[in-house]
Amino acid sequence: MIRSEFRKLTTVRGPWLLLAAGPLLVVAGITGLVESGGNVHDPGTQRAALAHTGLAAAFTLIFGILAVAGEYRHSTITDTYLSSPRRGHVIGSKLAVYALTGAVAGLVYSGVALATTAAWWAERGGHLQLSAAGTWLTLAGGVAVNAAFAAIGVGLGALIRNPAAAIAAALAWLAVIEGIAGQLLGSSRARWLPFYASEALGRSNLQATARLLPQWGGGLMLLAYAAVFAAAAVFTTLRRDVT
Amino acid sequence: MVAIEVCGLTKTFGRVTAVRDVSFTAPAGLITGLLGPNGSGKTTTLRIVLGLVRASAGEALIGGVRYAALARPRRVVGAMLESTGFHPGRRARDHLRVLAAADGIPERRVDEVLDLAGLTAAARRPVRQFSLGMRQRLGLAAAMLGDPQVLVLDEPANGLDPGGMAWLRSTLRDLAAQGRTIVVSSHELGEVTRTVDHVVIVSAGELRFAGPLSDIGPTHTALESAFLSLTH
């Protein structure tokens, strides 16, 4: 099943075009940070620049959503279930393949973020602090956010099998709903929400006042969200008749 | 040799009963035609056999076990359904390679079934460029991938031109001669009389007839009048 899932990915172009949008966002984001007056001598600015690795996970999230929802859209899900009537097994394989691919995409994004930051810092006479522990924690956290968001996307796309609806729901959550929910809950509870957790993991916290989980805690929360979405899908929507 | 047994199958979708207490056997090594007007429950019955739809009551067994209990289903049952989809941007050969990988089927077999379906020349074209008839051929190639003992084909003649029909007929005959069990749904009675051994007729979700074609009569007219009176 795992090999079959990898082949599904390598034999079409769409997913790769989607993931290729990540580096554009990283470059544009870091450039915007510098051009809008970011101080290259401030370690906080360096961290904010490198944290774009994790922000590009919006693309790995959509990539994950299309794992199952895309199969329902093209009706290839029929053949997938004929090959593996155990639907939980199908989701397990997709989680593994998409999380791994998301991690690889995150690695590429982190390389792009590092190179872009280095270029701007050299341009503006700053000194890139590679030896600071925070540098590598930020980059590694960003890679982990990409892997986790791909996995969350797999579960979400299995739960909401219409790709347009699933993508709209995910983006609306990231852009609007979580912010409102966070205010309603208060910062001590809001930190458990998925985007806040991803900020903790990717160290991309833009509001210094928000009290986030520790980095590892953000990672665990994202894993839990991925597991909950996937399990919910296996026990609800994926049990439905394929007609 | 593997037979398909359908026992007391019932399926309700909300308040609609699509299949009501249907029982029949598709004997091993024969071609069984599942006939009925549109909306008579043929497709639902086949989907239950393949584990895609859950029965509300009753069960469908393939060689004595449910589809979901088969360890490597494609090596036992090959299926082709109307709704089986293809990713429009994926090449025909890649479509089959994806399916082959799921069941550990070697790539050599992919080329064999492409050849069997007459698609070798089109193997590297994306499916979006395929005609309906070519998609049907690709669907049949996918069904044959695991060299299965049982074939379940839902309206395989749809979209085929006369040449394609003749090809389908002789292919099914060859496969049955090798001892395979084939179930094929259709509403093309003329085609059926030239292909099948055994007939199951359903109408409005209920079984109307199950038995050898010879019990009805070997001619198109005999089958047509039986079909019309049974499904009226």
Image (cartoon, coloured by chain):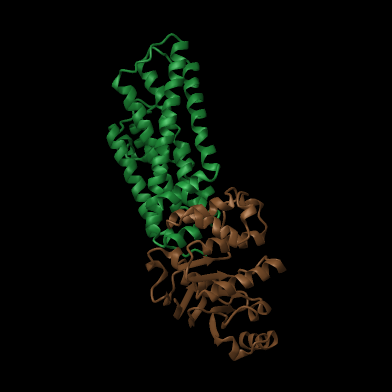
Look at the image and tell me whether residue B155 can be seen.
no
- Occupied quadrant, residue A53: top left
Residue A193: x percent and y percent? 35, 40
**Which chain wears brown?**
B
Q: Position of residue B135 (x, y in %)?
A: 62, 59
Quadrant in which the C terminus of chain B is drawn: bottom right
Residue lying farthest to the right in this orientation = B162
* Above or below for B101 versus B193: above
Give the quadrant of residue A139. Answer: top left
Name the residue located 45 percent from the left edge and 25 percent from the top edge.
A112
Give the answer, above or below, for where B10 lies relative to A179.
below
Q: Nearer the viewer, residue B171 or B136?
A: B171
Camera sees residue A110: yes
Residue at 60% x, 52% y: name it: B123
Image quadrant containing the N terminus of chain B: bottom left
The chain drawn in green is A
Residue at 39% over, 41% down:
A100
Question: Where is A214 relative to B54, above or below?
Answer: above
Residue B106 in percent (x, y) is at 46, 55
Q: Which quadrant of the figure has residue B168?
A: bottom right
Residue A209, image x, y percentages: 33, 26
